[in-house]
Image: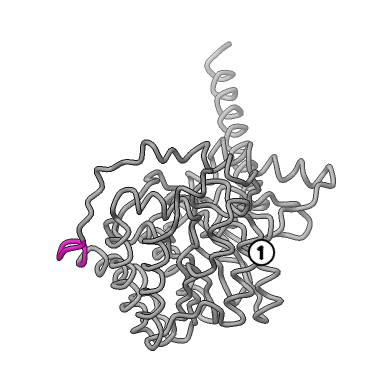
Amino acid sequence: MNQKEAKKWLIKSVTLLFFLLAMAAGMVVLVDPYFHYHKPLSVFSYRLYEERYINDGISRNFDFDALITGTSMAQNFKPSEMDALFGTNSVKETFSGAGYQELATNLDRALSRNPNIKQVVWAVDYNGLLRDYDWVQYEDYPEYLYDDNPFNDVSYLFNKSIFYHGVLNNLAMTLTGTPPTTMDEYSSWQLPTGLDQILASYDREHVNMDTPTDFGEAEYHTVVKTITLNVKEIADKYPDTTFYIFYPPYSICYWDSLYLKGTLLRQTQAEQTATELLLECPNIRLFNFFDQYDLICNPDYYCDSGHYSAEVNSRMLHWMAEGTGLVTRENYLERLAEEREFYSNYDYESIYQ
């Protein structure tokens, strides 16, 4: 091959390479599996999965006026059921294993982009009240999907995993007539429930007894910082949005673990501090279902000590719509006293007999 032919070959090869790259990027933009550029196109079937990749795209490009968020404790909510009860047009943006800050940051982005959001249902994990305000479980994030910098979109446009598992998968679903994932199905799960399932992951004979039992000044300031920075500031920033916040109703085995460790009083003191802070916000409707004993004391609703079935999520939506479990300035101390009395004197041994 002479020099002239070599030059032509190089030009053709480079041209072909750029053409293929442009085609791949164009396909990503057209299908847009994580909705970074546009809302779902009706000609495609989309698989909704990978919450930390897709939720920001939902905030950017979906049409909605209400939002459901939280950890796995909120994943089984059905937006269609919320819409029927509250007259909303809602979406679901949950984050499995998220800390308070992660949820707050996503909410802030969603609310800033959608000033018409009138309602948020928000699961505030009870077992996270005493964690640091910036506690995280997952640190790897697709930052290129979360900012407005067009230059780092190369990580999206030329990402092999996104092309194979996002673009091609959605095209395959479309060609085979597979229906798209509904918002009700998105991030939802179904696992076997019952005492045997709970005991597969909860061993009361080996409960960690090293947990601090005191609620002192340090613990008080931890709760104040966690709630103020991650919940109150969001509510105060968006006064026209009503936040339906609830503490997830964990099973009686969770309360058993608090009792065994001697941390039940510590946890309820943290709850009191958080509750008093949340009640300062006029646009927060706080709900507590810890007095729903028929639910909490029945292991048939739980797959482990904390996670409940989708039926419970449905019940909670109806309770919130009805006002059942609403915490107010007038009743929170009485409710808290009853809670301490019940869970401090419950016959936990009877669960396992």
Q: Specify whether 353 is left or right of 185.
A: left
Tell me the residue that label 1 is attached to: 78
Q: Is residue 202 above or below residue 75?
A: above
Query: Furthest residue to the top?
Result: 1
Q: Is residue 120 above or below residue 26?
A: below
Q: Could you say which quadrant of the image residue 117 lies in?
A: bottom right
Identified by mark 1, the residue type is Lys
* 92 or 29, nearer to the observer: 92
Q: Could you say which quadrant of the image residue 140 lies in?
A: top left
* 201 or 169, nearer to the observer: 201
Residue 59, x across and y down, in percent: 54, 66
Residue 38, x across and y down, in percent: 62, 62
Query: Furthest residue to the left?
Result: 217
Residue 84, x across and y down, in percent: 71, 76
Q: Is residue 313 above or below residue 118?
A: above
The colour scheme applied to this rendered structure is one colour
Q: Could you say which quadrant of the image residue 309 lies in?
A: bottom right
Chain part drawn in magenta: 215-220
Q: Specify whether 144 is left or right of 61.
A: left
Q: Is residue 12 above or below residue 124?
A: above
- Which structural element holds mark 1? loop
